[in-house]
Amino acid sequence: MYTITGITGQVGGAVARNLLSRGKQVRAVVRNATKGQAWAERGCEVSLAQVNDSNALTKAFEGAEGIFVLLPPIFDPTPGFPESQSAIESLRKALSAARPGRVVCLSTIGGHVKRENLLSQLHQMETVLGGIGLPISFLRAAWFMENSAWDVAPARETGVIPSFLQPLDKPFPMVATEDIGRVAAELLMASSRPERVVELEGPKRITPNEIAAAFAKLLGKEVSIQAVPRDSWESLFRSQGMQNPTPRMQMLDGFNEGWIEFESGAAKSRKGATPLEAVLRSLIEAKTEQ
């Protein structure tokens, strides 16, 4: 039995689908029964637990051969990341009590970086969960290609996509969530000693200009991309409702300046198989159906 947290999200769902396709038993951890219904219909056992409820998580984790865990994303954190610290402590308690045979934890490119930014939450998670004495793999994934879901509407409506990743001709490490799910499932099922850190990106690095070109090809219209001026970020994010935009800005600076990078470098990262165009096509189709 493999227990999957975050199963209703893109990555957790991809992990579960990969395990089910290999005939494995899956336990879906969800916040309420309604969210688990679709997975129950696919033959999964469903366990109810909130990430901050360590007792419920322990029950969900008990008896599992392997567990996939992730930290619920918090894009506008309170200074010091207390929300994430609470969730990490709950995961630590549950994993320490359940003692599964293997854990795969979704982390991020730059998970080793001590310089504060939005991804510091995942650095904290690696530090805490790495100290509980379990066979654990930290899967450090690149920027999700699926973040371009936000670009579908402007590409269609105005033909101009705003970009916080800049310069526009710089190749950035990106990866499809389907590749993350596949690699996570492989790590859970592996019989060998688990790799402590796995750094994963797509088949090639991608420039913002290439994102615009791919949209233009798929939409059959001219699409360009424009860099959002750095000095406008704070006021823009606050106008969108953010209370603490600094960590997000620091993260974007890290990508743009290059200090958020894989610890072992691009040459040693594992490469996924899913190209950008395939992801953008699925995003466009999903938006069309809505």
Image (tube, rainbow, N blue to C red):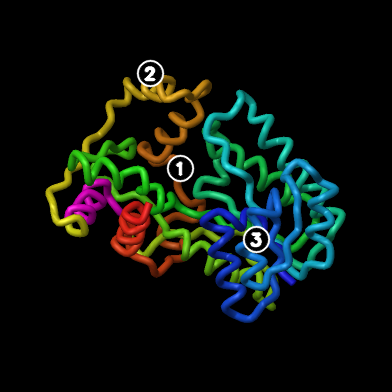
Identify which residue, 280 or 191, lies in the foreground. Answer: 280
Q: Is residue 212 magenta?
A: yes
Residue lying at 40% horizontally and 40% vertically, measured from the top left: 255
Task: Name the residue carrying label 1.
Answer: 260
The reply to whether residue 205 is in sight is: no
What residue type is disc 1 on? Ile
Instruction: Please identify the quadrant where the N terminus is shown.
Output: bottom right
**Pointer 3 residue:** 37
Work out whether 230 lies above or below 257: above
In the structure shown, which secondary structural element does the residue marked by tag 2 occupy? helix
Residue name at image x 64 percent, y 81 percent: 23
In space, the residues marked 3 and 1 are separated at their CA atoms by 38 Å
Tell me where residue 239 sits by quadrant.
top left
- Classified by dominant secondary structure, the portion drawn in magenta counts as helix
Q: Position of residue 86 (x, y in %)?
A: 73, 36
Q: Going from the N terminus, do you reach mark 3 or mark 1 first?
A: 3
Position of 75 with respect to 166 (left or right) is: right
Secondary structure, mark 3, is helix
Quarter of the image for residue 157 reads top left
Residue position for label 2: 235
The alpha-carbon separation of the residues under discs 3 and 2 comes to 41 Å
| Residue 48 can be seen, yes or no | yes
Residue at x-position 51% and y-position 45%: 110
Query: Bounds of the magenta span?
Result: 205-216
